[in-house]
């Protein structure tokens, strides 16, 4: 038998075969096909026909240390030679324990348990289910969840339910459980947000409040201040509402601190993590919780067990990658790099604030974003998005605007020179459109 029966071919033939068979995420089935990538190194993606593309969005926010990071690749290889997978119910392994201990060092002190899953959406599902079962286990009827308008927490049903209702979720609306949404804190409506929240909190029915701390990613990198979130957290504390911070995008240094909730005075009860956790090498989700939550499950009464799990829960390779990624994240070099990017972004943000074609410039840690002024209403479906994406790609810069929102979210290894190439591409494209 042939060792490898896959047909080889030219980049064009690969693309053709992809187009015939492969269904890509968030992509219409008609229109331009995908670009073949052969290799990744640092901030670059290489195509078979010689293009070198700067990945200025860390490949959907996951490759925090860039591509092909040797330390992570080696950690995975070493682990693969020992143990690639074992059922995680009734068994454990070194990388899982090491990672749990490593995470405990950077999580709020009260966090005592780490639950593993596979991606951001599942880390959110776990957080929601933990919170709801907490109330069930202690025999109190609290069944409602509060979320923020504009939120995005993933694509599984629970995660979709607590996300903003829009075109993406429309076909599924009849199947999503009811959620109380508070207005997004847009800067001019703090009192309205706080009052809406206080009113819901006082109902005594709220089990949990879930939020993307300080930065709503998919809604267009919208930033809101820690002081406002602290007020909401305080209301939760006063009304025994469980707080769930979705740090899937903001975690692991993205906003300047290790977690965005590190900017707050109040620590969340549950934290959802994924994306950057393995440095982009392997899928992994993690949900941590405080001892207070854990206590409601710590019983020999089997009806109170958390009956949730995935086949690949705590996959040893993913855990080994995450341990290696965490070491890099906490290194002096990486800390310096994040600060350097922050300063570079700030200089760029200043230029953008004076630019006549853009508005609402925001900058938090290693993320900088702004809106391109268009006659059309803002939003994900804004037509300028496709033009911008193509123009950036024509300049070998991967930026994936969210509607008319352009954001730069680079791997921490990107050099100042490459950052300048990205900024220049943005400024050139703004001149052109
Ligand atoms: C804040 C937030 N939560 C959850 C998710 C879902 O993560 P995943 O795509 O890994 O399921 C995302 C993805 O963009 C996200 O930004």
Image (tube, rainbow, N blue to C red):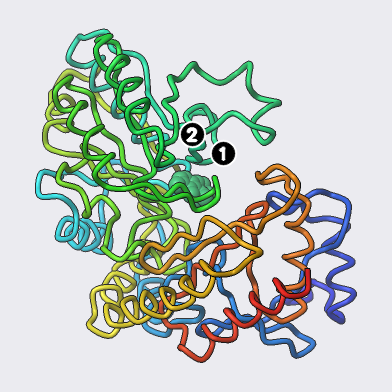
415 sits to left or right of 38: left
**Between marks 2 and 1, how big is the CA–CA gap?**
6 Å
Q: Residue under circle 2?
A: 159
**Labelled pair 2, 1 in contact (Cβ < 8 Å):** yes
Question: 169 above or below 423?
Answer: above
Q: Residue under circle 1?
A: 155
98 sits to left or right of 118: left
* One can see residue 142 in this view: yes
Question: 97 above or below 43?
Answer: above
Identified at 76% across, 56% down, the residue is 384
Q: Secondary structure at mark 2?
A: helix
Question: 44 above or below 170?
Answer: below
Q: Residues within 10 Å of mark 2 (few under 14, many from 20)?
A: many
Identified at 60% across, 80% down, the residue is 54
Residue 418 quadrant: bottom right
Residue 69 quadrant: bottom left
Which disc, if any, is residue 286? Answer: none
Identified at 47% across, 83% down, the residue is 414
| Ligand 1 is within 8 Å of the C-beta of the residue at disc 2 | yes
x, y percentage for residue 398? 65, 72
Q: Secondary structure at mark 1?
A: loop
x, y percentage for residue 224? 37, 47
| Ligand 1 is within 8 Å of the C-beta of the residue at disc 1 | yes
């Amino acid at each position: 038998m042939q060792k490898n029966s896959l047909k080889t071919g030219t980049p064009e033939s690969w693309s053709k075969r992809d187009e015939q068979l492969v269904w890509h995420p968030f992509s219409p089935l008609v229109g331009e096909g995908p670009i073949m990538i052969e290799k990744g190194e640092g901030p670059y993606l290489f195509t078979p026909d010689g293009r070198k593309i700067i990945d200025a969005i860390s490949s959907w926010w996951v490759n925090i240390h860039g591509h092909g990071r040797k330390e992570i690749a080696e950690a995975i290889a070493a682990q693969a030679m020992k143990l690639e997978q074992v059922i995680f119910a009734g068994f454990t392994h070194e990388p899982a324990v090491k990672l749990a201990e490593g995470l405990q060092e950077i999580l709020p002190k009260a966090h005592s348990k780490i639950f593993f899953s596979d991606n951001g959406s599942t880390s959110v599902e776990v957080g929601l289910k933990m919170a709801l079962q907490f109330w069930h286990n202690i025999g109190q009827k609290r069944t409602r969840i509060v979320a923020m308008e504009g939120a995005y927490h993933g694509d599984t049903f629970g995660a979709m339910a607590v996300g903003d209702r829009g075109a993406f979720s429309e076909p599924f609306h009849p199947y999503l459980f009811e959620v109380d949404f508070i207005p997004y804190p847009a800067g001019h409506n703090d009192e309205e947000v706080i009052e809406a929240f206080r009113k819901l909190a006082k109902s005594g029915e709220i089990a949990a409040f879930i939020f993307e701390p300080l930065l709503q990613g998919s809604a267009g990198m919208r930033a809101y201040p820690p002081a406002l979130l602290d007020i909401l957290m305080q209301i939760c504390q006063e009304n025994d509402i469980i707080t769930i911070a979705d740090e899937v995008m903001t975690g692991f240094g993205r906003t300047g601190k290790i977690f965005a909730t590190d900017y707050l005075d109040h620590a969340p009860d549950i934290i959802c993590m994924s994306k950057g956790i393995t440095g982009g090498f392997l899928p992994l989700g993690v949900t941590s919780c405080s001892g207070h939550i854990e206590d409601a499950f710590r019983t020999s009464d089997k009806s109170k067990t958390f009956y949730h799990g995935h086949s690949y829960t705590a996959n040893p390779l993913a855990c080994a990658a995450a341990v290696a990624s965490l070491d890099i994240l906490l290194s002096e070099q990486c800390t310096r790099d994040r600060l350097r990017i922050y300063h570079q972004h700030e200089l760029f943000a200043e230029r953008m604030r004076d630019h006549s074609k853009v508005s609402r410039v925001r900058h938090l840690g290693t993320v900088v974003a702004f809106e391109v002024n268009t006659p059309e209403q803002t939003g994900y479906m804004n037509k300028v998005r496709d033009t911008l994406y193509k123009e950036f790609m024509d300049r070998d810069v991967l930026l994936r605007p969210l509607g008319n929102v352009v954001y730069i979210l680079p791997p921490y290894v990107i050099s100042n020179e490459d950052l300048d190439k990205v900024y220049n591409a943005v400024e050139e494209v703004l001149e052109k459109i």
